Image (cartoon, grey):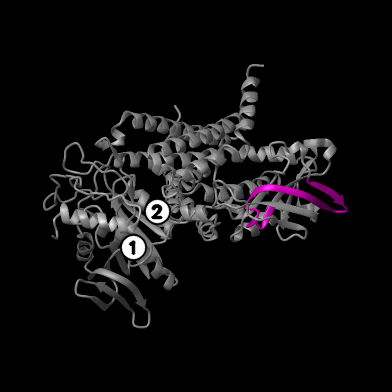
Amino acid sequence: MEIVVCVKPVPDAETRLRAAADGTTLDIEAVKFVLTGYDESAVEQALLLKEANPGSKVHVVSAGPPPRTEEVLRASLALGCDLATWVEMPPGVAPDPISAARALARAVSAMPHDLILCGKNAGDDEAGVVAGALAELLGVPDHSAVVDLRWDAASSRLRFQRSTEAGMETWEAPLPCVVALQQAWNDPRTAKLPSILKSRRLPIAKVPPEAAPPAAGTTRPTKFELPPPRTGAKLIEFKTPEEAAQKLVKLLKEEAKVFP
Amino acid sequence: MPDFSLTPEQESLRDLARKFARTEMAPHAAECDRTSRFPEEIYRKAYDLGLLNLNVPAEYGGSGLGLFEQCLIVEELAYGCGGMTTTVIAHCLALEPILLDGTPEQKERFLKPFCAEYHIAAFALTEPSGGSDPGSMRTLARKDGDHYLISGEKCFISNAPQASLYLVFASTDPTLRHKGVTAFVVPRSAEGVTVGPDEEKMGHRASSTATIRFDNVRVPASDRLGAEGTGFSLAMRTLDQTRTPIGALATGIAQAALDHAAAYSLKRETFGKPISEHQAIQIKLANMVQAVHAARLLTWRSAWLIDRGQKGTLESSIAKCFASDAAFAVADEAIQTFGGYGYMREYPVEKLLRDAKLTQIYEGANEIQRIVIARELLRGYG
């Protein structure tokens, strides 16, 4: 099976974030970008499928600016992906979701692809647009919020579950298709030190950016604000759980007045 | 101008060690410290990720890192737990003599099977009579045909209870003092090897330390490293390689102490405001961060010089001595910042002081480092 995984570099959750000088985007100066969240689950799913189906290949693709896009591709190679393709974008901010989907579709359509895996949405903008748009551009079906994906060779069908508010749905679907994955149902592996060293020496295929991207219809950020700092928290110091409970009840009664 | 930025590869290695230290080591550090437990499951995971045989070349199954990259990893691991990191460092220390003076045949024979699965090694140099004076070594290796018979006692040996391989220094001719010292590779399974009980230590309690007795242990001459009498030189050249990572280990402890103190100072209030707004605490934090940065830069420079093929005797002694003194001072100030809470076992900083203390003592006590530093310094004026 030819498995393609699409990933996006997003700011590390431990990075201290701030707005850029023009106030419209995140300041990417000194931000560390990583492979994380849903994308990490997607890579893990691709590797599990490859291991369960000998002869499969995992091709990781990302569209974005240097150097962070190269870094998440190398991180994916270190985890065990076989090939990497980078759709190069100009330095600076990441492409908007539609531009990203167009860039990915151009790269994916030029490579063998049975199954295209994406994270359900990126950990930074939470847009959740790319997987659906990519499927549309490739002319294949897409399935969202998927967990636990398996390939049934006998029936040539993917079998997977979708996690919804109402419950767990079980589906089957033919290839090719795009699948957008939920986070944290699998336990993404950690790249080993020798694989990290080896990944630095593996080639990354580069696809140049579109010569004349369509100007109309694209979105543009107008303002970026950090959430206001949280206030009002009160730490209770205590020696025993009993003391903690007593102090908490006293505060709830006398200060918060949630019960008489 | 020198470039202090890390390459993307170095950053990836550091991130791997950081993640491992914070998710696998740190959560168990307090428990292992309290119960003096050697967490084998953690070292097995470290082995699986390539974080154990750091200094062994890839061709023998190790990670094949330069000293600079080893130091990046060791600092991160020590941030998670100094004691657990001592196990890793003592393990690498024991393998270093094989890398330095082993023949290609010996490297192949000892390192390949050793690194092919999880194993621990121990470096057996120190004796009850003293660790800083290998010339007065009492462990003897008597020639017996194409074998040696080793007898004697080694003490304070990190990893002794868990190691399957010992790097043993013994005298083949005591009259020659340090020129009679010879190095041997001895399997734990050899007849006549007995390991004493685990020592109760002040710090680094996740690591194991014990005495090893050798009673007429038969070792084939083919397991001797280098010629007879070259062991002292080998031990010194080994320590030239491994002293710098002690600086990294101490820097990791110091960074942890600083982070705890700074975070606590923003939370803890006295006289109606966070103690971070009192100058007395700001001055402490300012001094602590200077010590941490200086320790790291001295360690980096020493590692960088040695990676470029220089001996780095002066620089590695400066890095080890300064960083370990800095770690002790920074941990001390972290406790002071925490006040009474800092003295309590429930909080993490008192462990850091106990762990920092050992870095001033092992792999050449800081008094010895200062003798070396002065000697190297004066050489430039003589």
Q: Nearer the viewer, residue B216 or B219?
A: B216
Q: State the quadrant of the N terminus of chain B.
A: top left
Magenta: main secondary structure equals: strand
From this view, report whether residue B196 is shown above or below residue A53. Answer: above
Residue at 19% over, 60% down:
A129
Q: Amino acid at mark 1?
A: Ser
Q: Position of residue B233 (x, y in %)?
A: 72, 37
Q: State the quadrant of the C terminus of chain B.
A: top right
Q: Chain of mark 1?
A: A
* Residue range corresponding to the magenta coloring: B139-166
Question: Which picture quadrant has residue B219?
Answer: bottom right
Extreme-bottom residue of the structure: A154
Q: Which numbered circle lies on residue A41?
A: 1
Q: Nearer the viewer, residue B179 or B274?
A: B274
Q: Chain of mark 2?
A: A
Q: Position of residue B294 (x, y in %)?
A: 46, 31
- Secondary structure state at the residue bearing disc 2: helix
